[in-house]
Amino acid sequence: MSPDPKTIPAEPDHPETVDIIGLDDVDLSALAGSLNRVTSPSSVSEAVKQKIDTHRDFYKTGVDIIDQEHLAICPLCEQGITAPDPKAVIDAYVEYFSDEEAKHKSELRRFYGALNNKEKQLSETENKLARQKSRYDTLKVYLPSMKLTLLTESENAIKAMAEAISSLKSAIEEKAKSLSLPASLPDDDLAARARVINRVIEDNNKSVDALSRAVSKSDEERKKSQRQACGVFEREFAILRWPDIEALRALQKDEKDKTAALEALEKSSPSTNARARVAETFEFLLKDFFGDKYVFDKDTFVLKRGAHEMTRGPHRTLSDGEKTAIAFCYFVACVHRKVAANSDYHRLFLVFDDPVTSMSYDFVFGIAQTLKNLNISDQGEVSINPGHIDGNKSKRPELLILTHSSYFFNISVANKVVDENAAFALHPDKGIHKISWLKKYVAPFQEQLKDIVEIANGRDPDHSTANAIRSVLEAVGRFCRPDKSSSLTLFVQHLAAEDGIIIKSVLINSFCHGTYYDEMPSPDDLKLACAETVQVVERYAAGQIEVIKGIAAQG
């Protein structure tokens, strides 16, 4: 008859094997010799013996300390023990423990203690055997092949061994009272009793192992049966519900097809109308910057001045600042050319390299505001309305903004175009460039002017000299002659015409915006440009030179 797999618990409580009881810690041969040995009574008085036996360990410890350390005082109460009366008492204690009687009693006590431990072990084994039997009887009923098996009863064997231990303890107690008389081991053989209980333990352990193997085998049968049952259920369910299954498959296929079509549409959408989106965004940004002054014709992709084309061409019609602003708008509009799917809009990372070059201050602020409020929806709609930013459907793109303009830096940080923790400065340090966190107001004008003055007076220029010249001239022009400084080119022309100070534009270029010249300006040309820049500052802002001289004098 096969086991019923349904009734066996998934996690059955298996009976555990029990360790046998050893007698290595009870030397019965030595105990027999100790019982048979005759020891003469000590000459110490019975009163002292009784007193010692009452608290034997206490007296033994004290005597050992005095004997080993040669003390003149009691180690416990610290009273002197050299006087005749206390010394006589101590000597009696020492004499007793030196006698064979005391040694023999100590030996008997060790045997007695070992038997006490054996009694404790026997009690624990009794509990383990009872637990083993209980679990065995509970589990075996699930297995017909094991249902009628029984574990060997251990109660009588346990009881017999306990009585043998008790007999030995009684023999030791009687011997301790009469050391001068020989004694022998009791007739009840402890070793024989131990062999009996150990045979019971070994037989029961074998039965427990057999039960565990049967349960394990049954568990495999149960799993196999369950798998077969699941297979039968699957087939029956499929036969009865086949129309529903086919309908579900059709729905799943339809969902898969529509998902693929949606993905294809998403991928095709940005690329098919990218030109129209660029034109729409470019037109929108131009209107924000210039109103109706400049209009973009989306059909011809041509920039017009109002309703008219620029007859002289944009290069001659537009100022440097206007060119930069228009380029900024077109750069932002071209994000539509960089995406393959609408989901790419939220992965854009825009890098702006000094977007305010040669701009008037109103343009600089306009660029900053646009960068602050720029947001792109998940459908690719570009907006500069801060109310649209929700961090979900419409997000700000990731930005990296590089600039040499202290004004642009300051308004960007102050107006939170970038987070204050994301503002950094690049500076030289012992031949290498380092980036440091910077959120305070930046005023590099004095440092740049200080470098220009030092170079004009003989110091060699470096890679930052051209940019310093450009920055100082732009600052002087915007603050001192704003009417002549809509662009740096216009201010340089004014200097040449009105003040006779001629500065070649190539020397002003900072070489940091992708421009490359085959003939780089020589150090002498840069020194001359620095000297001419000092003339401009002395002409329009002489106090600045005095400030620089004062700083140099303090240094």
Image (cartoon, rainbow, N blue to C red):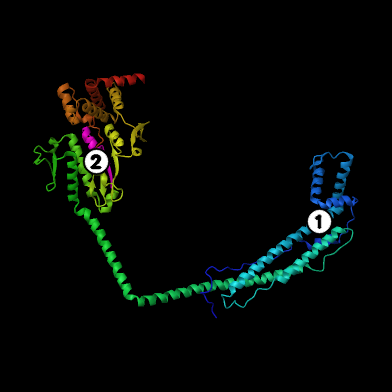
Residue shown at the point (79%, 44%) measured from the top left: 65
User: Residue 468: percent from the left, percent from the top?
Assistant: 27, 29
* Residue 1 figure quarter: bottom right
Q: Which mark is residue 370?
A: 2
Mark 1 to mark 2 CA distance (whole Å): 101 Å
Q: Which mark is residue 107?
A: 1
* Residue 45 in the image: above or below residue 191: above
* Residue 506 figure quarter: top left
The tally of labels here is 2
Bounds of the magenta segment: 348-373
User: Residue 5: percent from the left, percent from the top?
Assistant: 52, 75
User: Residue 121: percent from the left, percent from the top?
Assistant: 71, 62
Magenta span includes 357 = yes
* Residue 16 figure quarter: bottom right
* Residue 378 in the image: above or below residue 157: above
Q: Is residue 53 visible?
A: yes
Tag 2, which secondary structure? helix
- Label 2, residues with CA under 10 Å away: few <14, some 14-19, many ≥20: some
Q: Is residue 89 left or right of residue 237?
A: right
Name the one closer to the observer, 390 or 468. Answer: 390
Q: Which mark is residue 254?
A: none
